[in-house]
Amino acid sequence: MYPAIEPNRMTGNEPVVTPSGEIIGCLAGFWQWAYSDLVGNAERGALAEYIVACALDIADGVRIAWDKYDLLTREGISVEVKTSGYLQTWEQKDLSKPVFGIQPTYGWDSKSNEYTTEQKRQSDIYIFCLHKHTDQTTINPLLISQWDFYLLPTTVINKKFKSQKTVTLSSLIKAGAQKCDYQDIKHMIPRLCNNGI
């Protein structure tokens, strides 16, 4: 048996070492090399998860990339974080149209390495994070002011969008997604999950 490996939170100072003991880099250097493109879809998605985790005061752990939902609040509410943006790292003729993924999935449990038997949306609520900035010269996804946040309980998504795989921002707003200031995310989540919209 090989039980799940619990990841440790790193500092960034951990060295990369050759067999002869020579230090050729450090973990922070790897992070800079691999993840500095915060406008790219994958990195922007992970950053948005971190931003929301900070809003929920649960960013002290380690991200589990392939778990069945992205975050779990201290109250036990599961959260799926989805991102979209107008600007991309590649050359664009026009701004991108914001589209978010909402595809039902077979949930994977990182501890047991098993999938659920039912294909569904795994979280209690979705947070749609729109990187709204449209000026390439000042783009900086680390600035919360460049983001908008929309919250919608999964029950509403299931009712309005059935088995749909993607959804536009305008459709989310029409379905009742609540635009939320960053500092209010923590309090809005339980309110929406308890009361609906």
Image: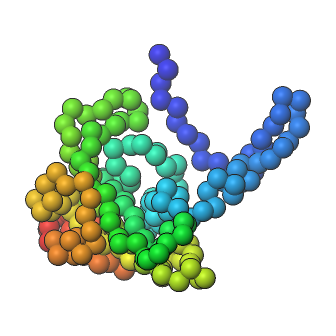
Q: How far across and down, in percent of the image, does residue 38 sit?
A: 56, 64
Q: Tell me if 18 is positioned left or right of 41 in this view.
A: right
* Residue at the spot 57% in from the left edge and 75% down from the top edge: 140
Q: Position of residue 110 (x, y in %)?
A: 41, 36
Q: Residue at x 47, y 75 (%)?
A: 93
Q: Residue furthest front?
A: 93
The answer to whether any part of residue 12 appears in the image is: no
Q: Nearer the viewer, residue 23 or 10?
A: 23
Residue 189 at least partly seen: yes
Residue 174 in which image quadrant: bottom left
Q: Return the x and y of residue 24 as percentages of the image width and height.
A: 84, 43
Above or below — where is 112 with respect to 196? above
Residue 189 coordinates in the image, percent (x, y): 28, 67
**147 lies left or right of 8:** left
Q: Which residue is at 21% across, 40% downward?
A: 119
Quarter of the image for the C terminus: give it.
bottom left
Residue shown at 54%/69% (left/top)? Answer: 91
Q: Is residue 90 shown left or right of residue 34?
A: left
Number of on-image labels: 0
- In this rendering, the answer to whether 19 lies above or below 36 is above
Q: By what rule are the colours in the image chosen?
A: rainbow
Q: Residue furthest top?
A: 1
Tell me if 20 is positioned left or right of 170 in this view. right
Seen in the picture, residue 30 relative to 106 is either above or below; the reply is below
- Which of these two is toward me, 53 or 41? 41
